[in-house]
Image: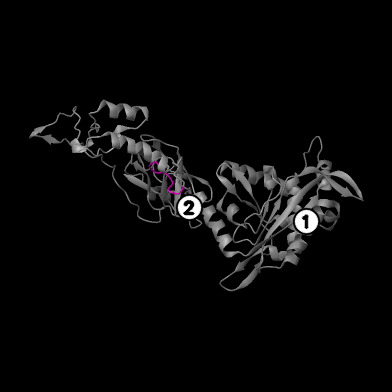
């Protein structure tokens, strides 16, 4: 019998949530056959089996959170000679960190406890009989007066919920009247209700590993970073026109987001203070030699921020292809831990949600995030006359430790000018 313990999936993760089982008890599996999908704080991972045999036990239902090193699945050996160690020597190709790092913890199948048959007066109760202790028997309210019953019925008072004040617990008229009066004195607080509002809880949802990681990152950002926000309205008409000019019958051309990324990368190369981090231990401001541009993306699992590695080396078309690939991987839950953690600056296109602005939270340990609102038709003064233009709003949230407002405003103005006159920026790229 071999028990597969949840392996260390890297990035310092300590637990994972079972998304779905790919096998069931009784199935025959081979080495490296996928047995489960688990969700970590980073992504959804498909786990291959390090053992061959018959599935004996699944240690948890979908939704169960399992700590690293705890049993995930137990597999009974079909051939005693087929073990994980032998498969490993033969080159089974396991790639997850932590496989085979210990001797393992083989455990037999859990035995179900035998049903206890209570004895009554020295005789055993037949298996088909149901033994109900006296304390668990349904409680019958002690009421004698028909008048008390009628008052309770008319006022919708549950007699079983009352404790009688009469002899031997007899429910009398004053008990019912007191229950009715209490309804008007204070709001009735249901069991498991919120003590502040008196409202019953609709549901409780355990935080997944992903939500825990998001909460920890954002809380740390708010606690450590003295952030400031600056914003500007931008005439993006020329940017939209440029996007349309790149479109043809045979080639859709790079999208608006790829053009925005190109201008943001150019801005970071001009103002590298915003492309770094704060080393608090050494009290140093660090700037990266290169740009991994993070892109906030909404998925079924929540908001994730995968990054385009070495965005400064890619053409606009290459950026567009990489953005599309990351977007598809994010929606499928197939982003790698590196793609989710390597960003040096974040671009958040919250305009896709139909909003104009947002005071975003910096993705720690980065030091800035740029947001782009929706692009809509609005009146705008051009050459002294009112015209309908494509307007958007850019907002920059930055860490005040790395630069002052002047540098942040200069970067924001550079990107805004690129939106308004993209041809001039492309001439310098």
User: Could you tell whether 19 is left or right of 256 in the image?
Assistant: left
Packing grade of label 1 (10 A; few <14, some 14-19, many >=20) is many
Residue 142 visible to the viewer: yes
User: Could you tell whether 378 is left or right of 86 in the image?
Assistant: right
The numbered mark at residue 9 is 2
Front: mark 2 or 1: 1
Query: What residue sits right under mark 1 in the picture?
Result: 415
Q: Which residues are magenta?
A: 188-196
Query: Which image quarter holds the C terminus?
Result: bottom right
Alpha carbons under labels 2 and 1: distance apart: 39 Å
Packing grade of label 2 (10 A; few <14, some 14-19, many >=20) is many
Who's the residue at 57% across and 45% down the image? 302
Numbered disc 2: secondary structure: loop
In the rendered image, which quarter is residue 279 located in? bottom right
* Residue 194 inside the magenta-drawn segment: yes
Numbered disc 1: secondary structure: helix
Residue 68 percent across, percent down from the top left: 41, 53
User: Could you tell whether 249 is left or right of 303 in the image?
Assistant: right
In the rendered image, which quarter is residue 364 located in? bottom right
Residue 411 against residue 52 in the figure, above or below = below
């Amino acid at each position: 019998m071999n028990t597969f313990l949840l392996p260390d999936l890297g990035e310092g993760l300590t637990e994972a949530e079972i998304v779905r089982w790919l096998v069931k008890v009784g199935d025959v599996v081979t080495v490296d056959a996928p047995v489960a999908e688990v969700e970590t704080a980073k992504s959804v991972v498909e786990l291959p089996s390090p053992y061959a045999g018959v599935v004996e036990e699944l240690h948890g239902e979908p939704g169960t959170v399992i700590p690293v090193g705890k049993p995930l699945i137990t597999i009974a050996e079909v051939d005693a000679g087929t073990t994980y160690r032998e498969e490993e020597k033969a080159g089974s190709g396991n790639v997850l960190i932590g496989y085979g790092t210990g001797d393992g913890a083989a455990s037999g199948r859990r035995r179900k406890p035998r049903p206890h048959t209570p004895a009554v007066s020295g005789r055993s109760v037949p298996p088909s009989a149901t033994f109900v202790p006296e304390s668990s028997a349904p409680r019958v309210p002690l009421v004698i007066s028909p008048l008390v019953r009628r008052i309770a019925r008319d006022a919708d008072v549950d007699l079983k919920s009352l404790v009688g004040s009469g002899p031997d617990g007899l429910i009398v008229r004053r008990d019912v009247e007191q229950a009715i009066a209490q309804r008007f004195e204070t709001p009735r607080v249901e069991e498991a209700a919120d003590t502040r509002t008196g409202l019953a809880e609709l549901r409780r949802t355990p935080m997944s590993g992903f939500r825990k990681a998001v909460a920890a990152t954002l809380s740390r950002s708010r606690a450590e970073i003295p952030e400031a926000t600056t914003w500007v309205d931008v005439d993006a008409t020329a940017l939209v026109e440029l996007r349309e000019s790149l479109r043809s019958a045979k080639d859709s051309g790079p999208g608006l987001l790829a053009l925005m990324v190109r201008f943001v990368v150019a801005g970071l190369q001009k103002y590298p203070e915003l492309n770094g981090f704060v080393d608090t231990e050494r009290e140093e401001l660090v700037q990266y030699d290169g740009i991994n541009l993070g892109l906030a993306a909404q998925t079924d699992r929540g908001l994730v921020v995968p990054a385009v590695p070495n965005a400064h080396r890619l053409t606009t078309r290459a950026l567009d292809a990489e953005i599309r690939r990351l977007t598809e991987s994010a929606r499928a839950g197939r982003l790698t831990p590196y793609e989710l953690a390597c960003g040096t600056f974040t671009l958040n296109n919250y305009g896709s949600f139909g909003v104009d602005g947002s005071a975003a939270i910096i993705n720690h340990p980065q030091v800035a995030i740029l947001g782009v609102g929706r692009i809509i038709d609005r009146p705008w003064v051009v050459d002294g006359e009112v015209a309908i233009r494509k307007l958007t709003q850019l907002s920059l949230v930055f860490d005040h430790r790395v630069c002052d407002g002047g540098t942040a405003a200069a970067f924001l103005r550079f990107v805004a000018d690129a939106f308004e006159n993209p041809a001039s920026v492309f001439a310098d790229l």
